[in-house]
Image (spheres, rainbow, N blue to C red):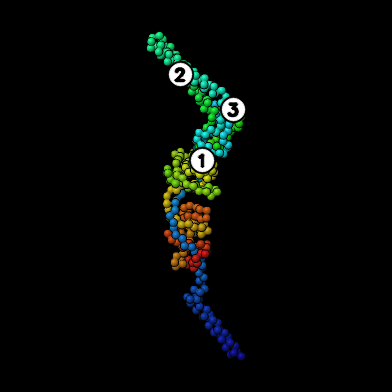
Amino acid sequence: MKNSTYLSIGLLMLVVVWMLSGAMAKVNDPVATEEITSKPVMQVQVLDIKAEMIDREIVVQGELIPNRSIEVRAQTASKVAELPFAKGQKVVAENVIVELDGEDRHAQLKQAEAAVDRFELEVAGARKLEQRGLQSENQLKSALASLAAAEADLKRARLELDYIQIKAPFSGILEQRYVELGSHLEKGDKVALILDESVLKAVGLVSQQAAGKLAMGQLIKVRLLDGQEAEGHITYISQLGDSETHSFRVEAEIDNQDGRINAGVSAELRIVIGKEQAHFISPAVLALNDSGTVGIKSVDQAGLTAFHPIEFVRTEANGIWVSGLPESVRVISQGQGFVNAGETVIPVPAS
């Protein structure tokens, strides 16, 4: 009985030793260790992109204003007799936009013309008498003074007659009309507002850092809120910065002969300051490294990932242009948040 018990215990110990030796052998086996510690290789979607030559721009918010605008005022007093143009109509330079009552101005003109004729005859007679020694030099001078006064009266009479026709100083739009038929005007009263929208000015303020990169004649691209676009060239750069914002005013002329763009609207001004190679990407592919730097993760031919810090060049409605990448690069477009630089992945082309 005792011998059988010892035999059973011995067999049990042999089994335990055998099992332990097998487990230890497996732990020491490098193949087995790799199977335990390795993880599956991750798949990521990738997109191949190439650099393009684009404009480097300074982007500011601004507005479009008329090239010229003027408030036309009355130059004489009278009552409004005719209004040939309605508000909003186009007018051409020298078109009569308001006609005043002539009152007695025609009669005054004829009277002034008659006075000039009379004094011209007096001067002519005085000259002849002086030449014959029958009249003094002072009498001739008096006749000449009277003629000069009559000519001045004639000039005023003609101007008064001209002033009753209030004309457009340049071609444009009759934006506002401040009078109606029968309105009585005094000299200096406002009559109308005329805008010249054939050329618009794109006006914006640039920072003092950007002002040094501007030059006369540089291209400006204008984008309106409704999607319309136009181009012009810088015609003015302020030499004095604003004392509060330290910004500088810049203006560009935009051709608007077809009248398709209205003045007084907000606009995005893109000032082209050079050329640069850049990649167009979706913001969705951006990533951060461990130090918080913004960049893009890529994959090479061997499936090895890398991180590239980038700089923003300009934004578009459907993406952004960035620099800092190789000329041709395979960007991780999906799954970049789950892999680190230096890891191996399986790239799958994005649909």
For image coordinates 49% across by 20% down, the residue present is: 113
Name the quadrant of the N terminus. bottom right
Q: CA distance from mark 3 to mark 1?
A: 30 Å
- Where's residue 179, x and y in %? 59, 32
Label 3 Cα neighbours within 10 Å, binned few <14 / some 14-19 / many ≥20 = some
Out of 176 and 123, give the one closest to the viewer: 123
The picture places residue 284, in percent across and down from the top left corner, at 53, 58
Q: Nearer the viewer, residue 57 or 121?
A: 121
- How many marks on residues? 3
Q: Secondary structure at mark 3?
A: strand
Residue at the disc numbered 3: 79
Q: Which callout, 3 or 1, points to the residue nearer the camera? A: 3
Check disc 2 and report the residue beneath it. 148
- Viewer can see residue 8: yes
- The amino acid sitting under disc 2 is Ala
> Where residue 348 appears, x then y in whole percent?
50, 67
> Badge 2: few (under 14), some or many (20 or more) residues near its Cα, within 10 Å?
some
Amino acid type of disc 1?
Glu
Q: Which residue lies at the image location 44% right of the left edge and 51% below the top edge?
A: 55
* Residue 203 makes an appearance in the image: no
Q: Nearer the viewer, residue 188 or 124?
A: 124
Q: Label 2's element?
A: helix
Which badge, 3 or 1, is on the more N-terminal residue?
A: 3
Choose the circle earlier in sequence order: 2 or 1. 2
Q: Residues within 10 Å of mark 1 (few under 14, many from 20)?
A: many
Direction top: furthest residue: 134
Q: Between marks 2 and 1, how big is the CA–CA gap? A: 45 Å
Point out which mark residue 197 bears.
Answer: 1
In the rendered view, would you say 308 is above or below 254?
below
